[in-house]
């Protein structure tokens, strides 16, 4: 049932404020002072390192979480594609928490990476949308994401719910390890509880994005740039665009631009720049200006302050509501999903069933 939407993907994008609020409600204690994990929970003071291995969009959720665990909890994190991790015999020792993120909970490579860590890591945690799945069952602690069934092959609401659970986990780790006070945790949880309303507000960008997508649909290639937590979002944007619109898209960390990809820039190259007005904004904007100086067509995704400062000369600007830096990646998933969706609709591709793709990849 598409609930009046043309595609499941559009319905699932629209559901995000609701499902994210359900995820938050499941984990944030009633008095909003702490985070409840299922079962016996997990003691982050018992580990000194995290390894994460996943595939596709779930891998990008892990990459985002690396910034959170490192910055908030001061825990070193290693993230790899499950398909690489499983064959590279990585040393996984006591004191390591291994975390596997998978919407389906059945992805063959992710399951194999989990089995490799079983007996080596101190604990196996998983973040899944299917509590009965193999990955959920074979972990010491499964953290459900409460996204509800995701039908569209391109992951949308599962991604934002995965990010929500991972941010909660990083906050929990930070607090448990004495890196965050009770008051700060309380304030951050209050900010997170405001996220669904901000996501709702952000949905007002959809009409504008539809117009931009009409033009993006005529491109053969696209680049996505971002720094810090916006880098994984750029990667997710490029993946989403290529898988449903079949436009060749790549993402780079903004700082990598001048080390090669800038050679690709000409008048035919749209460049999506993910840049909320945070501590890295000026750096990203200077990369953006290098793109514009070479004729590249910039689609700047930012907030009001960022647009005020940097939208001169850009091709299009997408303005999102203000949001805390840490939470921004969850909100900035919306514009990349809308861009991919409306570009695919403009091109007339099969949005929910893109060619050559399967929803659950149970063979490697
Ligand atoms: C992209 C997408 C895939 C999955 C990947 C992992 O939109 O949906 O990249 O994220 O196949 O699947 P799960 O999360 O089920 O392990």
Image (cartoon, grey):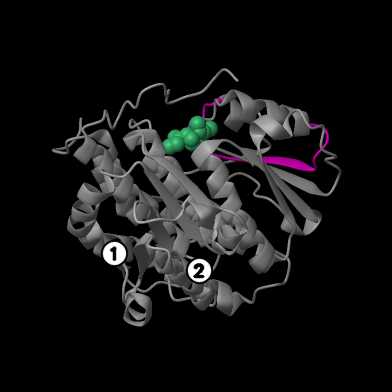
Give how far across and how far down residue 122 sits, in percent.
80, 43
**Compared with residue 258, is residue 130 higher up or lower down, i.e. above or below?**
above
Q: Is residue 357 left or right of residue 15?
A: right
- Quadrant location of residue 140? top right
Give how far across and how far down residue 30 sits, in percent.
45, 62
**Compared with residue 230, is residue 26 higher up or lower down, i.e. above or below?**
above
User: Ligand 1 within 8 A of label 2's CB?
Assistant: no
- Residue that carries the numbered disc 1 in the rendered image: 315
Secondary structure beneath dot 2 equals: helix
Q: Nearer the viewer, residue 255 or 219?
A: 219
Residue at 38%, 52% in the rendered image: 269
Residue at 79%, 47% in the rendered image: 96
Residue at 53%, 48% in the rendered image: 61
- Quadrant location of residue 182? bottom right
Q: Main secondary structure of the magenta part?
A: loop
- Residue that carries the numbered disc 2 in the rendered image: 287
Quadrant containing the N terminus in the rendered view: top left
Residue at 44%, 64% in the rendered image: 291
Give how far across and how far down residue 307 sits, in percent.
33, 76
Image: magenta residue range: 118-133
Mark 1, other Cα within 10 Å: few <14 / some 14–19 / many ≥20: some
Give how far across and how far down residue 137 sits, in percent.
61, 28
Secondary structure beneath dot 1 equals: loop
């Amino acid at each position: 049932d598409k609930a009046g939407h043309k595609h499941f993907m559009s319905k699932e994008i629209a559901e995000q404020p609701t499902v994210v609020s359900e995820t938050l409600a499941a984990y944030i204690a009633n008095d909003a002072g702490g985070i409840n994990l299922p079962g016996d929970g997990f003691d982050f003071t018992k580990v000194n390192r995290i390894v994460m291995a996943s595939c596709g969009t779930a891998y990008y959720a892990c990459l985002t979480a690396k910034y959170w665990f490192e910055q908030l909890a001061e825990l070193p994190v290693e993230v790899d594609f499950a398909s690489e991790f499983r064959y590279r015999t990585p040393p996984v020792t006591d004191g390591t928490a291994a975390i596997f993120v998978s919407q389906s909970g059945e992805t063959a490579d992710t399951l194999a990476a989990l089995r490799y860590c079983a007996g080596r890591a101190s604990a196996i945690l998983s973040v899944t949308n299917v509590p009965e799945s193999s990955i959920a069952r074979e972990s010491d602690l499964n953290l459900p994401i409460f996204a509800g069934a995701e039908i569209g092959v391109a992951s949308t609401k599962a991604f934002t719910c995965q990010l929500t659970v991972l941010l909660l986990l990083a906050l929990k780790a930070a607090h448990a390890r004495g890196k965050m006070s009770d008051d700060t945790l309380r304030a951050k949880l209050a900010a997170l509880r405001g996220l669904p309303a901000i996501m709702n507000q952000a949905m007002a960008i959809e009409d504008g994005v539809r117009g931009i997508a009409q033009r993006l649909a005529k491109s053969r290639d696209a680049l996505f740039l971002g720094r810090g937590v916006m880098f994984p979002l750029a990667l997710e944007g490029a993946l989403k665009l290529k898988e449903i619109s079949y436009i060749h898209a790549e993402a780079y960390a903004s700082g990598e631009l001048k080390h090669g990809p800038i050679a690709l820039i000409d008048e035919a190259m749209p460049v999506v720049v993910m840049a909320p007005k945070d501590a890295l904004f000026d750096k990203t904007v200077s990369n953006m200006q290098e793109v514009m100086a070479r004729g590249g067509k910039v689609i700047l995704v930012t907030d009001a302050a960022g647009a005020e400062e940097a939208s001169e000369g850009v091709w299009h600007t997408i303005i999102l509501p203000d949001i805390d830096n840490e939470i921004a990646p969850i909100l900035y998933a919306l514009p990349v999903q809308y861009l991919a969706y409306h570009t695919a609709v403009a091109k007339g591709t099969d949005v929910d069933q893109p060619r050559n793709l399967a929803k659950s990849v149970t063979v490697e």
